[in-house]
Image (spheres, rainbow, N blue to C red):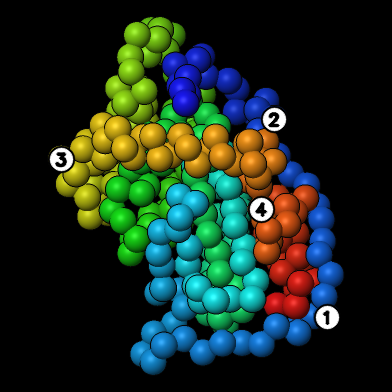
Amino acid sequence: MTFRFAAPLLALAALTACGDGAGNTSAPAGSVAAVAAPAGQDWTQTVSKTADGGYVMGNPNASLKLVEYGSRTCPTCGAFGQNATRPLEENYIKSGKVSYEFRDFLVHAPDLGVALLGQCAGEGPFFGILEQMFVEQPQFLTKLETVPNDFQQRLQSLTPAQQATAWVDYLGYVDFVKQRGLTEAQARQCLTDPKKIEALAKVSEVAMKEKDVTGTPTFILNGKKLDVATWPQVESALKNAGA
């Protein structure tokens, strides 16, 4: 499989892959029982990588399994991350009723490098880094509005790994992760790891071919795709499913 990351950058506001929607599932509100976390912990401390290439937080046997396919440079995903993280964790994941899995979906040109850095530190710091990427997303998106033409032209001759590195250097994401526990050597090793690049590309390919994912954010609850994009819409779907 091949992903072309050197295409000219599209205006973020015009990208149809980043959008909104609304939808519901139906079950008696509050019908899902809470499940206690292991002694001395809460479910937000339980994080693991999944066979589908995502990272899941919460009770692995939760009755409600929420999956998000998201892009770390998608403004709609950023708004969800900024608004949803705390209430989702405090009101739903900690109860053991809901698990939340994030799968990186490559939409925009910089996504490969940003996702590689977001996953580089492993399971424990994954969701903390994801949240902070969304909180600080606006400052990175500002840089995307003024990408020099010569930079985009130079990308055309680079490999995907070289493009990924060029984008995160231009946007400042290497410095971002260095402030959050990674060394520069670790970051650059992740950016050039062919297995990690292939694995990320495969997640997006499978999502498009088998999961009917056409843009971000895409939410799936217990295997059913939801027509939602905002936290109030997702919370409504969780409540309607019994959370």
Tag 3 residue: 185
Label 1: which secondary element: loop
The image quarter in which residue 35 lies: bottom right
Q: Nearer the viewer, mark 4 or mark 2?
A: 4
Q: Which residue is mark 2?
A: 16
Q: Residue at x 56, y 69 (%)?
A: 99
N-terminal-most mark, 4 or 2: 2
Q: Does the CB distance between marks 1 and 3 fall below 8 Å?
A: no
What's the residue type where badge 2 is placed? Thr
State the residue position of label 4: 219
Tell me the CA gap for discs 3 and 2.
36 Å
Classify mark 2: helix, strand or loop. loop
Residue 189: x %, y % from top left = 21, 38
Q: Is residue 187 left or right of residue 12?
A: left
Which is closer to the viewer, label 3 or label 4?
4
What residue lies at 31% left-to-right and 37% top-to-bottom?
A: 195
Q: Quadrant of residue 233?
A: bottom right
- Residue closest to the eye, 142 or 125: 125
**Are dots 2 and 1 in contact, CB under 8 Å?**
no
The residue carrying pointer 4 sits among few (fewer than 14), some (14 to 19) or many (20 or more) residues within 10 Å by Cα, namely: many
Give the number of callouts: 4
Instruction: Identify which residue, 47 or 149, lies in the foreground.
Output: 47
Q: CA distance from mark 1 to mark 3?
A: 51 Å
Residue type at tag 4: Phe
